[in-house]
């Protein structure tokens, strides 16, 4: 409608959420493009945005969420992802509650709740919240209910405060009741009479005991200052001042003060009385009673402390939330930078592969021409420098292919000590320290050595070549002692490497950006700014975390923490060396970049292989199915066309006899690369590669395949044979569905993928499957409902549920025989669940 267009503006649409609503692609929802919204919808949104209280509108039968700035603060970490989402998808843990709200209000009724208790996941963890909720229908242009307007007022702080107050008041009332009972049963500490004219005090036996004076002397009268010796020094002046005012005004006397007990401690008492006057109206005598109020004062103090600290607790909670939001923003920024650098490295590696391949062939052609060989060598060195730069980018992006092995920290540091002395020079003292019985870790040993070496070189530069470098490895338990649980490190056992220098340290503004790529404080030409970013990416990709402690003038310490591994250290294998040549085997090269493809073909030809080539997976599959005798498939990971590399590899492995497969890539996407590691059984050659590396990888893959053809038992790490078991995959997100389909295919499983539970039921009615693998949150019927239906109607099918909340996912009543897996799913766990168990060993 005209008043919704950018030209005419949106009156009243102000604030952050107004901008987000305008920028959102509403054509993907049932609401349609924003410039086609009805007047009723636009007016409702304008009202919502102008409100200072948290408002959210649920439009349509699905309840697409549109909300204002106040509600965005309430949503916590789920903002801005809630915008435009169906309410049951946005808040799955209270889906049933929201469905009741939608059904009620779309029928024309209203709902309201006071201090409604719900369990919500706003910042990744379940929390009990209390809310005042008001729901009312919103009419469309024809007056029919089309949406629901919800006012959300969080009362959690008030409810908890009231509960604390009620608890304190209950304690106070109980104390007061005990006081009254005590008064009725002898808690009166004595009676007394003050003779104003003689300024003496007479008291009974209990009074004498209370003030630690002789009972006979008290009965005949004591100077007032004698009785006051037992009063706390800080209270004496106040008593005298109030007594003087009482004599002037003739008002009742009621004062609380402390008296010293026989054991030396002080207890609270209350003195009550009223002055009696003579016939002329002058003060004559002052009778009174002394009462023990010590327990009541203790209860009052507890209540006062509770009230005085409430504001501080609220301030602490707000500060903690602000810190968590800052951590989230930093994590999102680093993730975005990582995606960008990973893509750049991919294209850069392809360029380097073309240059490097042609240089190696030129070196062969140039023969003994010394000048040409010198130029070729200089160019080759430049290619290697570029490859190292690309590797650093991939390390930060967490896309470098890791080959993890079990590493002993003690053996690692011992092996690095000599190299560190040689690299850092004699003016840097290197000290190593090991904690008691350090745990092993599962990491890529070469990458870990590179990371520690990078940190050591950075430390040397920070110390200007002189100082002490301390390298330690020790066991830490996150969640105990000095290591507290954080969003980056969950509770558990870790092995922590620490690199400490005695340099100048970093100011806060430098420390904030230290892990970002290309950030450096070194002069131009002295560094790329990728060293620390590479270390950060490697640690995160390995399931650990990197952190820095630094202050100006106090040096710097970098911590690398990795999860504990209880397995034995992996033995090292020696490199046999040599460049193996081919024996006229046929290699099928699949590469979409023409220059890269040409370079690979020429290198393989020089190595003694017969070569076929294809620009994409579709053309390669035709060659495989044509019956040509192909010994090995050498394919890029990321390719255009319908047939992806994972499917092509599965088809090749399913041939009779099977065709060996070797992948190559400059940027390993999740097709063969999960949880920061290559999938089991997958061989990968990183771009840019040298001819010698290509020769060794090709020969290793051929020999492995030849052993398999000869009838040797297949390795457990190789993909299973195609057609062995069938899986029905249910996932509504297209990218996740495609990635999981490729992964299941690599595992040798026949996979059928659908986007909803309803589609899954149709497919199940037409065919048979061994396994159902379904996401929990689906657009219609939930994954839990689907799992319950399948377990009842088809008990032979193994059912696996996947959820980002893992075992904390809300699925209602337990479903016998169904496993709930944590998303993202660890490759090894998924492979075990799909191929290594039966229903008899699965618990709900």
Image: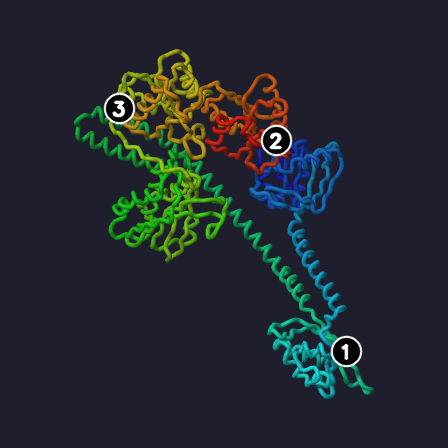
Separation of disc 3 and disc 1 at Cα?
113 Å
Q: Kindly indicate whether the residue at mark 1 contacts the one at mark 3 (C-beta within 8 angstroms).
A: no
Q: Residue at x 46, y 24 (%)?
A: 747
- Asked where in the image residue 214 lies, by quadrant, the reply is bottom right
Q: Which mark is residue 274?
A: 1
Q: Which mark is residue 815?
A: 2
Q: Nearer the viewer, residue 604 or 32?
A: 604
User: Where residue 280 sits in the image (x, y, percent)?
Assistant: 81, 87
Q: Residue at x 61, y 22 (%)?
A: 794
| Residue 14 seen from this side | no
**673 in relation to 162, above or below:** above
Residue at the right extreme, as displayed: 279
Helix, strand or loop at disc 3?
Answer: loop
Query: Which of the two discs, 3 and 2, labels the residue nearer the N terminus?
Result: 3
Residue that carries the numbered disc 3 in the rendered image:
580
On the rendered structure, is 676 left or right of 607?
right
User: Where residue 161 sits in the image (x, y, percent)?
Assistant: 66, 54
Judge the density around disc 1: few (<14), some (14-19), many (≥20) Cα neighbours within 10 Å. Answer: some
Q: Nearer the viewer, residue 14 or 396?
A: 396
- Asked where in the image residue 13 lies, by quadrant, the reply is top right
**153 in relation to 252, above or below:** above
Viewport quadrant of the N terminus: top right
Query: Which of the two discs, 3 and 1, labels the residue nearer the N terminus?
Result: 1
Separation of disc 2 and disc 1 at Cα?
76 Å
Helix, strand or loop at disc 2?
Answer: loop
On the rendered structure, is 512 left or right of 30?
left
């Amino acid at each position: 409608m005209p008043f919704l267009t950018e030209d005419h503006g949106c009156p009243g649409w102000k604030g952050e959420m107004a901008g987000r609503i305008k920028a959102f692609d509403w054509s993907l929802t049932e609401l349609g493009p924003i410039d086609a919204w009805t007047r009723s919808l636009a007016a409702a949104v304008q009202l919502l945005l102008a409100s200072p209280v948290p408002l959210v509108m649920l439009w349509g039968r699905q309840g697409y969420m549109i909300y204002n700035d106040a509600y965005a603060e309430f949503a916590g970490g789920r903002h801005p992802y809630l915008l435009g989402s169906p309410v049951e998808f946005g808040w799955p843990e209270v889906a049933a509650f929201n469905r009741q709200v939608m059904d009620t209000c779309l029928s024309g009724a209203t709902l309201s709740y006071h201090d409604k208790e719900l369990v919500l996941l706003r910042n990744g963890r379940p929390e009990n919240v209390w809310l005042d909720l008001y729901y009312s229908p919103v009419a469309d242009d024809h007056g029919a209910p089309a949406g629901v307007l919800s006012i959300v007022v969080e009362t959690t702080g008030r409810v908890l405060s009231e509960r604390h107050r009620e608890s304190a008041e209950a304690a106070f009332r109980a104390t007061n009741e005990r006081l009254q009972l005590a008064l009725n049963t002898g808690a009166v500490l004595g009676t007394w009479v003050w003779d104003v004219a003689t300024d003496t005090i007479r008291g009974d036996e209990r009074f004498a005991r209370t003030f630690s004076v002789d009972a006979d002397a008290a009965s005949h009268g004591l100077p007032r200052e004698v009785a006051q010796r037992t009063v706390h020094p800080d209270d004496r002046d106040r008593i005298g001042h109030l007594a003087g005012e009482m004599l002037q005004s003739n008002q009742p006397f009621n004062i609380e003060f402390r008296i010293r007990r026989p054991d030396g401690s002080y207890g609270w008492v209350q003195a009550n009385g009223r002055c009696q006057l003579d016939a002329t109206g002058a003060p004559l005598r002052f009778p009174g009673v002394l009462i023990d109020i010590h327990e009541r004062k203790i209860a009052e103090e507890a209540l006062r402390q509770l009230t005085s600290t409430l504001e501080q607790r609220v301030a602490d909670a707000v500060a903690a939330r602000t810190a968590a939001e800052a951590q989230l923003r930093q994590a999102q920024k680093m993730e975005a930078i990582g995606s960008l650098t990973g893509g750049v490295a991919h294209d850069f590696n392809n360029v380097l592969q073309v240059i490097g391949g042609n240089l190696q062939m030129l070196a062969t052609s140039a023969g003994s021409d010394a000048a040409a060989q010198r130029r070729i060598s200089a160019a080759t060195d430049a290619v290697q420098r570029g490859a190292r730069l690309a590797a650093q980018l991939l390390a930060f992006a967490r896309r470098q292919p890791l080959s993890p092995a079990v590493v002993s920290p003690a053996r690692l540091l011992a092996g690095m000590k000599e190299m560190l002395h040689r690299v850092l020079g004699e003016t840097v003292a290197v000290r190593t320290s090991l904690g008691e019985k350090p745990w092993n870790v599962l990491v890529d040993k070469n990458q870990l050595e590179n990371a520690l070496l990078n940190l050591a070189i950075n430390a040397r530069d920070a110390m200007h070549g002189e100082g002490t470098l301390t390298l330690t490895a020790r066991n830490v338990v996150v969640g105990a002692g000095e290591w507290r649980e954080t969003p980056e490190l969950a509770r558990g056992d870790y092995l922590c490497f620490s690199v400490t220098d005695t340099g100048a340290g970093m100011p806060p503004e430098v420390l904030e950006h230290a892990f970002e790529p290309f950030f450096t404080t070194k002069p131009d030409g002295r560094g790329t700014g990728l060293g620390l970013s590479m270390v950060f990416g490697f640690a995160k990709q390995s399931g650990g975390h990197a952190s820095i402690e630094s202050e100006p003038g106090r040096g710097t310490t970098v911590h690398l923490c990795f999860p504990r591994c209880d397995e034995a250290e992996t033995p090292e294998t020696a490199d046999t060396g040599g460049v193996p040549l081919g024996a006229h085997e046929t290699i099928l090269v699949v590469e979409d970049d023409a220059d890269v493809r040409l370079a690979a073909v020429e290198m393989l030809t020089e190595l003694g292989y017969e070569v076929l080539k294809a620009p994409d997976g579709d053309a390669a599959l035709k060659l495989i199915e044509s019956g040509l005798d192909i010994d090995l498939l050498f394919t890029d990971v990321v390719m255009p066309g319908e047939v992806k590399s994972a499917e092509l590899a599965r088809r090749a492995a399913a041939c009779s006899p099977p065709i060996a497969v070797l992948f190559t890539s400059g940027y390993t996407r999740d097709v063969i690369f999960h949880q920061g590691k290559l999938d089991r059984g997958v061989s990968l050659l990183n771009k840019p590669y040298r001819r010698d590396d290509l020769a060794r990888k090709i020969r290793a893959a051929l020999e492995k395949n030849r052993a398999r053809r000869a009838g040797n038992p297949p390795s457990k790490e190789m993909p299973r044979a195609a057609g062995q078991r069938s899986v029905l995959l249910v996932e509504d997100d297209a990218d996740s569905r495609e990635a999981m389909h490729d992964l299941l295919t690599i595992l040798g499983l026949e996979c059928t993928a659908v986007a909803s539970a309803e589609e899954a039921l149709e497919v199940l009615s037409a065919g048979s499957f061994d396994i159902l693998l379904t996401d929990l949150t689906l657009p219609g019927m939930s994954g839990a409902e689907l799992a319950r239906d399948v377990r009842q109607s088809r008990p032979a099918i193994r059912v696996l549920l996947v959820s980002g909340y893992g075992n904390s996912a809300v699925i209602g009543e337990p479903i016998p025989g169904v496993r709930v897996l944590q998303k993202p799913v660890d490759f090894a766990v998924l492979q075990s669940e799909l191929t290594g168990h039966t229903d008899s060993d699965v618990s709900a």
